[in-house]
Image (spheres, helix red, strand yellow):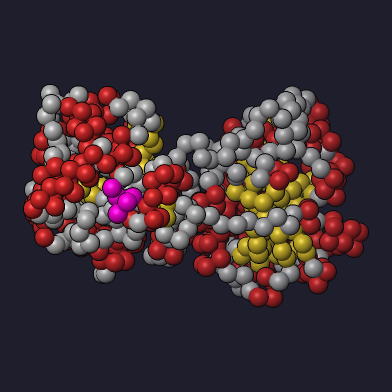
């Protein structure tokens, strides 16, 4: 049998000498079960490089879940660095080589001396010694220099910047130590894209138990941890490339190391199965579409009273509940259909409640297709407060609202239950026309100064990305103190950034709404970004008073929007009226305080 690690290798790596060294190395060889390691590796001994890694993984019964789309994040040419967390201590180096080398055969990994001493993998690994505290010292120098030359030649390199396996460091979960500034310096000088990756998983409970006694005992057990990974399925997340220009923006290697570490750990949020799925067993069947002729009769009947404007193929109405029983049925049906599609919804056959009766309804009607394209529910504060008080607002079911807020609410319109029907969600115009309708309502009610209402973030968003949005809003769009104490959530939201440091991760990525939106999109591998309405409201200078989790709406996160009309940027409002007369435009400009 060909041995990949001998007692002599162990003796040299541990710096042992003489007869005593031979004895200690021999005992360590048995304790570490290196004989089993040698037998395991011997089963793939006829293969070299990545092929050896593939067969070793196959022989161990290991499977790796990695998205083909995420493999597209690996550059097809030129140098690049893959930075990875280090949860297991050895096997992830072999798995990383197996996965990435299928895209880039020139890929090599900087890893510990055990893996680099496997003859079949020797040409694919640059050895660094985990028993040394600084990888730039002594026996690691050759591996470091080799890795730098490999990058300079335009090849791919994988690194584990923690330098050692993840352990418990004061939290209730194992995690990497702060990543090496030496590795960060190499990355910064290389001027190549950096690909963050994340391995999901941890070692056995016994590993962490002995590691608490002494870290060297944990390190000594790593070979056993390699063996016990038989018949295991691993999930690998591969992030979008971090461009050289972004890497260069970090002057201090320590700051870059911390950022790369958080970029790796943030990828945990993208793992399939860790996102809340919408329950389907408790949902009623959505009711059938409403009779068209009945809806057309209602539209004709309310035209003189409720019509706002026409644009393109659409008419817009502001209707009272009692005037539109059939249209209201269709609105309730479309609400449920639309909200279920994004992981929300009531689970009932219709989305309707007692607030519909005293709220008005902004309806966008497609005259050509003869169907509802979208809708808003509007509660007029000057009507609601005298009749119902604060309890007349739907938001009172989600938030604790102080009585002192009544005066402001009487000059406020509550927005809610807004939707663009599924058939129209790939079009821009319906949402634009609904916003135009809201602007018309503002003109129609001169005593109203604000909009308020819940803006939902679907429970399909991982809590990590919800937390990012909450942090961004709190820091970049803070609410004034006089408003902040007026409202509190009934079910507060508690942020969770997993093992990433939000201060490090988001620093420099929150300068603008669009930059933050694009950052979240890249971080999530194109899965998540700011909800469309949320983003639009932010561009209207919205403030968000607080956040509430709504258990009656599939645990949707509701952000309580507060908009002041005179804060609306002119370049966001006036384009909505580009086809209006000069007289109408002047009325709008006066209403929003532009003249």
Determine the residue positioned at 17% across, 53% down: 14
Magenta stretch containing residue 537, yes or no?
A: no
Q: Measured from the top left, where is residue 435 in percent x and y?
A: 62, 52
Determine the residue positioned at 61% across, 73% down: 595
Query: In the picture provided, is 222 more to the left or to the right than 370?
Result: left
Q: Which residues are magenta?
A: 216-220
Query: In the picture provided, is 364 more to the left or to the right than 154?
Result: right
Q: Measured from the top left, where is residue 105 in percent x and y?
A: 16, 35
Magenta stretch prevailing secondary structure: helix
Magenta stretch containing residue 217, yes or no?
A: yes
The vertical placement of 395 against 291, above or below, is below
Q: Quadrant of residue 247?
A: bottom left
Query: In the picture provided, is 152 more to the left or to the right than 311?
Result: left
Q: Measured from the top left, where is residue 245 in percent x and y?
A: 25, 59
Q: Nearer the viewer, residue 595 or 377?
A: 377
Whether residue 550 is visible: yes
């Amino acid at each position: 049998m060909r041995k990949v690690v001998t007692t002599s290798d162990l003796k040299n790596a541990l710096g042992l000498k003489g007869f005593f060294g031979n004895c200690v190395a021999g005992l360590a060889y048995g304790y570490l079960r290196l004989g089993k390691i040698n037998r395991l590796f011997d089963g793939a001994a006829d293969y070299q490089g990545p092929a050896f890694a593939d067969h070793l993984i196959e022989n161990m019964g290991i499977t790796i879940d990695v998205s083909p789309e995420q493999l597209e994040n690996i550059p097809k040419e030129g140098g690049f660095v893959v930075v990875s967390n280090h949860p297991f201590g050895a096997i992830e180096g072999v798995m990383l080589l197996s996965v990435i080398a299928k895209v880039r055969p020139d890929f090599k990994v900087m890893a510990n001396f055990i893996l680099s001493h496997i003859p079949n993998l020797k040409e694919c690994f640059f050895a660094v010694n985990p028993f040394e505290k600084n990888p730039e010292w002594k026996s690691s120098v050759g591996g470091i220099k080799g890795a730098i030359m490999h990058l300079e030649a335009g090849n791919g390199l994988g690194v584990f910047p923690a330098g050692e396996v993840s352990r418990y460091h004061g939290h209730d979960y194992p995690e990497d130590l702060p990543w090496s500034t030496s590795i960060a310096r190499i990355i910064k000088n290389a001027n190549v894209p950096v690909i963050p990756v994340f391995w999901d998983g941890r070692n056995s409970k016994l590993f962490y138990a002995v590691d608490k006694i002494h870290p060297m005992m944990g390190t000594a057990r790593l070979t056993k941890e390699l063996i016990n990974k038989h018949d295991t399925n691993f999930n690998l997340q591969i992030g979008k490339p971090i461009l050289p220009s972004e890497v260069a923006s970090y002057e201090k290697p320590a700051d870059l190391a911390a950022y790369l570490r958080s970029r790796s750990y943030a990828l945990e949020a993208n793992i399939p199965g860790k996102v809340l799925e919408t329950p389907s067993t408790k949902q009623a069947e959505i009711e059938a579409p409403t009779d068209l002729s009945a809806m057309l009769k209602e539209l004709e009947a309310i035209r003189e009273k409720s019509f706002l404007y026409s644009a393109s193929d659409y008419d817009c109405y502001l209707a009272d509940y009692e005037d539109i029983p059939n249209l209201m049925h269709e609105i309730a049906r479309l609400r449920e259909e639309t909200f279920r599609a994004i992981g929300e919804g009531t689970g009932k056959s219709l989305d309707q409640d007692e607030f519909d009766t005293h709220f008005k309804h902004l309806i966008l009607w497609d005259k050509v297709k003869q169907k509802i394209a979208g809708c808003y529910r509007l509660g007029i504060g000057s009507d609601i407060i005298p009749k119902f008080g604060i309890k007349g607002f739907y938001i009172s079911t989600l938030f604790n609202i102080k009585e002192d807020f009544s005066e402001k609410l009487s000059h406020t319109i509550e927005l809610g239950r807004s939707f663009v029907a599924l058939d129209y969600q790939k079009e821009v115009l319906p949402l634009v026309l609904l916003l135009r309708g809201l602007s018309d309502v503002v003109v129609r009610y001169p005593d109203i100064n604000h909009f308020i209402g819940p803006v939902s973030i679907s429970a399909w968003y991982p809590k990590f990305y919800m937390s990012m949005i909450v942090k961004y809003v709190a820091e970049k769009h803070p609410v004034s103190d006089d408003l902040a104490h007026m409202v509190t959530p009934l079910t507060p939201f508690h942020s969770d950034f997993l093992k990433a440091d939000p201060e490090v991760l988001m620093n420099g990525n929150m300068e603008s709404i669009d930059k933050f939106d694009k950052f979240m999109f890249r971080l999530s591998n194109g899965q998540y970004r700011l909800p469309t309405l949320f983003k639009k409201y932010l561009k209207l200078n919205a403030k968000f008073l607080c956040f509430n989790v709504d258990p009656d709406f599939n645990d949707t996160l509701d952000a309580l929007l507060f908009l002041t009309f005179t804060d609306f940027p002119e370049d966001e409002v006036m384009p909505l009226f580009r086809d209006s007369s000069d007289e109408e435009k002047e009325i709008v400009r006066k209403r929003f305080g532009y003249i």
